[in-house]
Amino acid sequence: MVNIAPWKAVLTIVVCILGFVYASPNVIPAETRLWMQENLPSWMPTKTINLGLDLRGGAHLLYEVDVDVVVRERSENLEQDMRSSMREDRVGYKRLGVIPQGVRVTLRNSSDGEDVRRMLRLNNPNLDISTSDDGLTVEATFNENGIREIYDQTISQSIEIVRRRIDELGTTEPIIQRQGEDRILIQAPGADAESLKNIIGTTAKLTFHLLKDPGSPGISKTFVMADDPRQTMEVEPRALITGDMLENAAPAFQDGQPVISFRLDNTGGRRFADVTRKNVGKPFAIVLDGQILSAPVIREPILGGSGQISGGFTVQEASDLALLLRAGALPAPMGVVEERTVGPSLGADSVEAGRQASIYGLILVLCFMGILYGLFGLMANVALAVNVALIFAILSGLQATLTLPGIAGIVLTIGMAVDANVLIFERIREELSAGRTPISAIDAGYSRAMSTIVDSNLTTLIAAFILFTFGTGPIKGFAVTLGIGIVTSFFTAIMVTRLLVLAWLRKKRPETLPV
């Protein structure tokens, strides 16, 4: 155990050097670090640890997603699909309408009931279908699996859209996660709560509809005008173009007025060209979140898959709306049920408190090891310094978010980092007392303490893994720093300290050990 293969020694030294190099950006002035990020390759040491909400300050928002809106939309879509299917199969019906979480069909002939049930099952397999005693009324409602699927899809899509919007704002390392059945937790370090709510809370559901011809049969939808809510327009219920067909959106100017320039993807571009070709001279409505922004007349076919949206925007409104359209529409409205703002001054106090705790803990451990184990204790202190550097280097490389529990994990790791060395040094003392020579005592100390060191570190690592797997938010941060600290402390105790002891042993060839 005393001898170390040359390649292991070289590898240990290289890892130690890289640890200090990649941890260094955390102590470099911000101006210098910014220059490095702009001028150095991405693999160079330019990354730092991000400060979490409790350290940097920022916004804590808890949203509730109105999934019932999506359930209603799915019911309306089912109604439209059934209307088309029954028309194609020439199934006669008296009434077709939406009911809570489903649709109801009133037939002319009970003999068509089985055909209607077949159509419903083809449209959506997650339906509970019931028929009245006379066989004329068929009701279909989403079953438990169908409702759960709608909830899961809606929340997952909402989280993804919220993440895109926050990423567009440039906020680093936000925490966005599901909480409960229909809530989303958002923690954005360094963000302003009000501006964040303005971006997140807007549904930004964009659709293009043809206007309904007065007096024509069929159902319609009514929307209000954005510039005058007292005015309304009736449009065709099915959207011709939807926001998910947008490929890009950006603020622009037309005749000196802010507008939004958009480009559709291939599917949207083909559909837009086909619709405008067939409806030249007819108006169509551009609807955003239930309000008609504008209703221009189609003068000629629009074949390029691009266009502009005007609506009396200010420059900031056009910029924000373009951001929302690029990120995509929320599948359902979201409302704030909890809001907290952490001020930068409180975060600075937390950073300072954590810094002092780390420094005091480090000093006490260094003094303890130096007093109790002399020269060997100083070697363990060098390994401890390497251990701290490696922790910061790994966290920086991962660009992890450091929170107060994360600082607690680092402080705990500082104390735990010397455990392995204490076990080794105490074992060496016992071997010396038993009459062994210095080299034999060191060899026995490392070899016989190894199983105990592995067991203690493995059990703590298992605990950290369980905390990370089942914990949330701050608990995960604590688990990450603790887990990284366990791995680095094992490396420094077994490799770095042993390398220092071996180098001293070969140089001094002592007859007694200062331990």
Image (cartoon, rainbow, N blue to C red):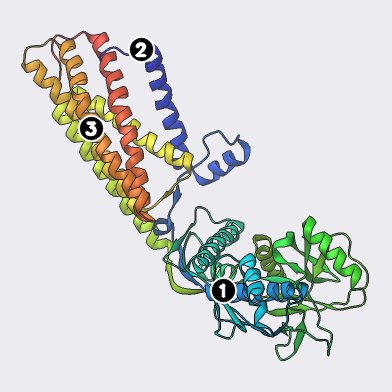
Q: Is residue 248 above or below residue 124?
A: above
Q: Residue at x 68, y 83 (%)?
A: 109
Decide which of tag 1 and tag 2 comes sooner along the chain: 2
Which disc is residue 71 wearing?
1
Do tag 1 and tag 2 residues touch (Cβ < 8 Å)?
A: no
Task: Determine the image quadrant of residue 458.
Answer: top left
Which disc is residue 455 wearing?
3
Can residue 174 be seen in the rendering of this structure? yes
Residue 355 in the figure: left or right of residue 75: left
Viewer-side label of 3, 1: 1
Which disc is residue 5 wearing?
2
| Disc 3 residue crowd, few under 14, some 14–19, many 20+, Cα 10 Å | few
The amino acid beneath tag 2 is Ala
Give x and y (percent) for residue 362.
26, 40
Q: Quadrant of the C terminus?
A: top left
Decide which of tag 2 and tag 3 comes sooner along the chain: 2
Q: Nearer the viewer, residue 331 or 19?
A: 331
The amino acid beneath tag 3 is Asp
Q: Residue at x 56, y 83 (%)?
A: 132
